[in-house]
Image (cartoon, grey):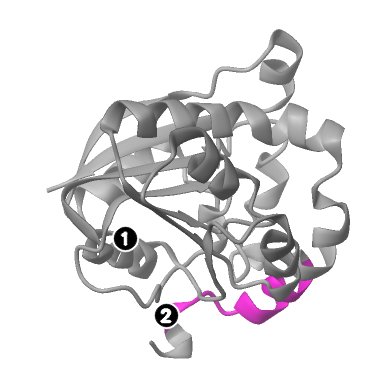
Amino acid sequence: MTAAATRPLNRLVHAGWGQLARVYDFAPVQRVMYRPPQDEIIARLAVHGARRVADVGCGTGILATRIRNDLRVDEVYGFDAAAGMLRKARARTDRVLWRQRPAEDLGLPDGALDAVVSTHAFPFFNHEPAVAEFRRVLRPGGLLAMVVFNPDGPLTTPMQPALVRGAAYWPTPEEMRTLLEGNGFEVIEQRRVRRPLFGAALVRDVVTVARRR
């Protein structure tokens, strides 16, 4: 993979997330912000019956660890490009295969996985190369489930100016659907993440579930 496959400010973003790893696991933040979308992903994986799963942009490894422990799958990979995040993930459990690699180059064989999931990390990926890589590592019929902040929401609207797009871009639900359907996926579900009332008013994120053709 060449450096051009990632976003221009990729290294800066990873360094920043590596520093944020120190406070990322703060319990109230996890409970309010991240637990609801993780619950959505866990439920979808259980229905799908996936046995080999990758969490891309896994952060400190909370979701990947839950997938391994709650669903008792055969194999779970946790991918993140931020060294600080992975240090905390590795300290969490040795039952997940942790890998420091970018989303655009996971380094797995073709068709190695039943499911790829990602919660709130996709905007930091280079979208087209990342989706192509997800399709490559998934078997036919494999599941892709991603949660992304809706850029029409109050938290994401200020993040969309062109000056930050070298670091991240938050696609709309319509853009997500177009991107996936144009790169070998069938979108089978797309909706708001279910959150408690106070959380739904503040955090507007969307889960998109697709199947590899």
Quadrant for the N terminus, please: bottom left
Q: Tag 2's secondary structure?
A: helix
Residue 37 vertical placement versus 120 (above, below): above
Q: CA distance from mark 2 to mark 1?
A: 14 Å
Q: Is residue 201 left or right of residue 189?
A: right
Amino acid residing under circle 1:
Phe
Disc 1 is placed on an element classified as helix
Q: What is the crowding at mark 2: few (fewer than 14 residues within 10 Å), some, or many (at least 20)?
A: some
The image shows residue 156 at horizontal and vertical percentages of 67, 41
Quadrant for residue 58, please give it: bottom right
Give the residue at x 23% y 66%. Answer: 136
- The boundaries of the magenta stretch are 5-16
Residue nearest the viewer, comparing 171 with 191 = 191
Instruction: Identify the residue under disc 1.
Output: 134
Q: Against 132, is 148 above or below?
A: above
Amino acid of disc 2: Ala
Is residue 76 shown left or right of residue 66?
A: left
Q: Nearer the viewer, residue 147 or 204?
A: 147
The quarter of the picture where residue 197 lies is: top right
Residue 116 appears at what percent x and percent y? Answer: 37, 51
Of marks 2 and 1, which one's residue comes earlier in the chain?
2
Compared with residue 96, is residue 51 higher up or lower down, i.e. above or below?
A: above
**Residue at 81%, 36% in the rendered image:** 29
Tell which of 187 and 143 is nearer to you.
Answer: 143
Q: Nearer the viewer, residue 153 or 79?
A: 79
